[in-house]
Amino acid sequence: MVSNCPRAVRAQHIFHFFISTTSFCKDRYAIKISTLHYQEHSHSETREKTICDSVLLLFTTTMADEVTLAPEHFAGSPFGVRVRIALAEKGVKYEYCDENSRVDSASLLEMNPVYKKRPLLIHNGKAVCESLIIVQYVDEAWKGKAPLLPSDPYQRAQSRIWADFIDKKVYEITKKIWTTKGEELEGAKKDFIECLKLLEGELGDKPYYGGENLGYVDVAFVPFYCWFYAYETCGSFSIEAECPKIIAWAKRCMQKESVSKSLEDPKKVYEYVLERRKRLEETQMHP
């Protein structure tokens, strides 16, 4: 017999509404309607009350989450890719707000008044900006699955240092590989290989920077992998010949669906680089 307890009735209504209006399956949560029924035995009352409370919390929380990602205009941008990987690792469903979406760019940029740029993550109406900060936010907001940052404060600080190194050194150096020529290009290639060797040293014998699982530094760095072809082609050098451990790590990351489905085709990245370089050259010729 179904209990007349308001908590149980409300839980049943939420459960039925959730199943009828979303693509989620109740089997995913291993919860049956029958668990919302109070049994006649008094010793079952506490257990059933706990189940009802859990169902209410689970479904109301899940249904309340509205997540939108506004990436940069080029899908291969390593900064937007970071966020997509983090969301995929956490299993977070989100709306992809591209140039053609109903939300105009001006409105999005108002949500990032400091830097006025993408990517932006909008969670229940609140905007978070800057890719590494967004990844940290995702890790904290959805703690239940695939932790990205270590729990140890020192290790967490070290992870942030390496991610900052990737942003401030690797990104700036690699941009020079496809925007410069002559001695400046040669210097950029040399500096890039030195950065990769430092990153190889930090990786050591671990499968990932996060240890046995994908971690914060992996998420920060692996989006650059789809740019390696463009770097090598523009700079006429081989990254694998210089840093084989980095390539092995990147290929290992690519075996994860969260990574392989988030990274852009390297050939498309190369086409984008050529177009950007052409425009830069035209600007320099006709300022």
Image (cartoon, rainbow, N blue to C red):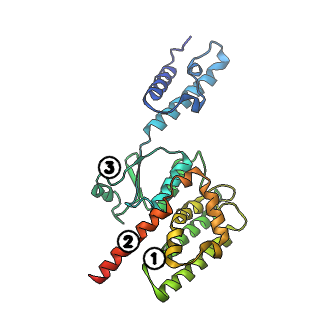
Q: Nearer the viewer, residue 255 or 55?
A: 255
Which numbered dot is residue 101? 3
Q: Nearer the viewer, residue 181 or 98?
A: 181
In the rendered image of this protein, does residue 229 appear above or below residue 107? below
Which numbered dot is residue 276? 2
Which numbered dot is residue 225? none
Tag nearer the camera, 3 or 2: 2
At x 55% / y 51%, what residue is drawn? Answer: 258
Sequence-wise, which precedes: disc 3 or disc 1?
3
Dividing the picture into quarters, in which one does residue 216 lie? bottom right
Looking at the picture, which amino acid does disc 3 mark? Answer: Ser
At x 30% / y 58%, what residue is drawn? Answer: 110
Marks 3/1: CA–CA distance = 31 Å
Q: Position of residue 73 (x, y in %)?
A: 37, 60
Dividing the picture into quarters, in which one does residue 17 lie? top left
Marks 3/2: CA–CA distance = 24 Å
Neighbour class for label 3 at 10 Å: few (<14), some, many (≥20)? Answer: few
Looking at the picture, which amino acid does disc 1 mark? Answer: Trp
Q: Position of residue 30 (x, y in %)?
A: 60, 29
Q: Nearer the viewer, residue 10 or 69?
A: 69
Residue at the spot of label 1:
178
